[in-house]
């Protein structure tokens, strides 16, 4: 129980601080610490992240940090992308998902480090 709460606390902190990253904490933690299978970890992560997004979203809204023109367009794309991604999750082997997720994290990390 304590590990699960700590995972939530850390991912909520990262999500609130960086406005992203909850899934980058939750998915690996569920897989490696709690030994949940990859597909279930990803699906659980999406559900777990929702309250974090709402909590930090309220703060960002109250602080007038949201660019609504971009937010609405990205949300529309996110709805369709989330649907397609969840459908694809059922069809892809676990190893492919692990490799794709790792490549994504390396790519994003590299872009952030070198600002390119």
Image: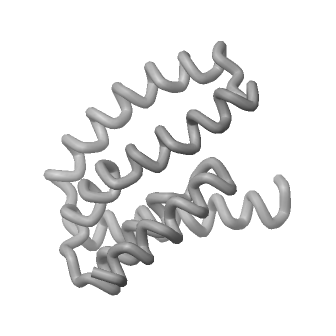
Extreme residue in the left direction: 90
Does residue 72 lie above or below 55 as drawn? above
What is the residue that sits farthest to the right in this orientation? 115
Observer-nearest of 100 and 29: 29
Vertical arrangement, residue 106 with respect to residue 77, above or below: below
In this rendering, would 12 be left or right of 86? right
Could you tell me which quadrant the N terminus lies in? bottom left
Relative to residue 1, is residue 46 depicted above or below? above
Residue 116: give x, y in percent of width and height: 82, 53
- Residue 115 sits in quarter: bottom right
Q: Position of residue 104 (x, y in %)?
A: 53, 60
Q: Residue at x 76, y 59 (%)?
A: 112
Q: Nearer the viewer, residue 114 or 27?
A: 27
Could you say where residue 90 lies in the image, as x and y percent from the top left?
A: 15, 52
Q: Quadrant of residue 27?
A: bottom left
Q: How is the image coloured?
A: one colour
**Picture residue at 27% right of the left edge, 73% below the top:** 95
- Circle count: 0
Residue 32 can be seen in this image: no
Q: Residue at x 40, y 46 (%)?
A: 51
Residue 106 makes an appearance in the image: yes
Q: Depth check: give the residue in front, 90 or 69.
A: 69
Residue at 59% over, 23% down: 71
Between 25 and 73, the residue placed more toward the observer is 25
Percent across and percent down for residue 76 are 44, 19
Horizontal relation, residue 52 to residue 98: left or right: right
Above or below, comparing residue 89 to residue 1 in the picture? above
């Amino acid at each position: 129980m304590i590990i699960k709460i700590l995972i939530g606390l850390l991912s909520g902190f990262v999500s609130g601080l960086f406005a992203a990253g909850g899934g980058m904490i939750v998915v690996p933690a569920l897989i490696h610490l709690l030994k949940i299978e990859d597909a279930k970890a990803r699906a659980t992560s999406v559900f777990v992240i929702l309250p974090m997004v709402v909590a930090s979203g309220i703060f960002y809204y109250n602080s007038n940090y949201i660019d609504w023109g971009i937010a609405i367009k990205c949300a529309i794309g996110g709805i369709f992308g989330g649907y397609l991604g969840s459908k694809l999750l059922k069809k892809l082997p676990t190893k492919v998902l692990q490799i794709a997720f790792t490549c994504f994290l390396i790519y994003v990390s590299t872009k952030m480090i070198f600002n390119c």
